[in-house]
Amino acid sequence: MSKVITPAALLTAFQSTKKVDLIDVRTPAEFHELRVSFAENIPLDRLDPVKLKLARADHAQGPIYVICRSGARSAQAVAKLKDVGFDAYNVTGGTLACDKAGFPMVHGPKTISLERQVRIAAGSLVLTGVLLGIFVHPYFLGLAGFVGAGLVFAGVTDFCGMAILLGRMPWNQVASTASNQTCAARH
């Protein structure tokens, strides 16, 4: 079980110190749509806790706070960070809860969230498998079964290979900017 912090408690910590290490583990496109102004984007699939620990060794000794949209990806990131000795906290409620709590936010162009992309892709594959199974050959029903099994696996393990694959697609990437730098690059 990972440690958690509420958006209100995190906001209080930020207002008192103006220095909080907040990592947003969503895709770059999601990050640029809506983000906490002082968050750093390190997508979950690119998070290297050992490299981050080495980059922070000289100066930052406080806790690291991790955020995503709903909490699933940030919980995975917190587990990875704890494995190498970080004092890491999952921000409950994600980015939307931080927006409601009054955090300084940056709004960018709209994008489709990774969770919606997974639902669209999985639904499309199931529908395609069923239609091909009915009209072409029953073996295509295996596609629908495979996707269904993948969704069950994702629900049980909280690991979704389709989300990782979609997160790497070109439409989920953005050009590197100053607000999209990692902790290692900034420190």
Image: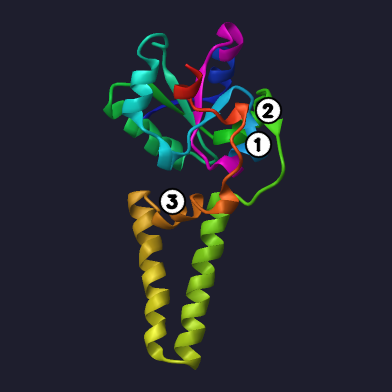
Near-viewer residue (47 or 98): 47
x, y percentage for residue 49?
A: 34, 29
Between discs 2 and 1, the one toward the N terminus: 1
Q: Which residue is found at the position 48% from the left and 23% from the top?
A: 185
x, y percentage for residue 50?
A: 31, 27
Q: Amino acid at mark 1?
A: Leu
Q: Which residues are magenta?
A: 14-30
x, y percentage for residue 23?
A: 49, 28
How far apart, in angstroms, are the residues tagged by discs 3 and 1? 20 Å
**Image mark for residue 34:** 1
Q: Quadrant of residue 89?
A: top left
Read off the residue under disc 2.
105
x, y percentage for residue 77?
A: 39, 35
Q: Is residue 17 magenta?
A: yes
Read off the residue under disc 3.
164
Q: Amino acid at mark 3?
A: Ile
Q: Quadrant of residue 7?
A: top right
Q: Considering the image in quadrants, where does the N terminus appear?
A: top left
Q: Can residue 1 be seen in this snapshot?
A: no
How crowded pointer 2 is (Cα within 10 Å; few <14, some 14-19, many 20+) is rated as: some
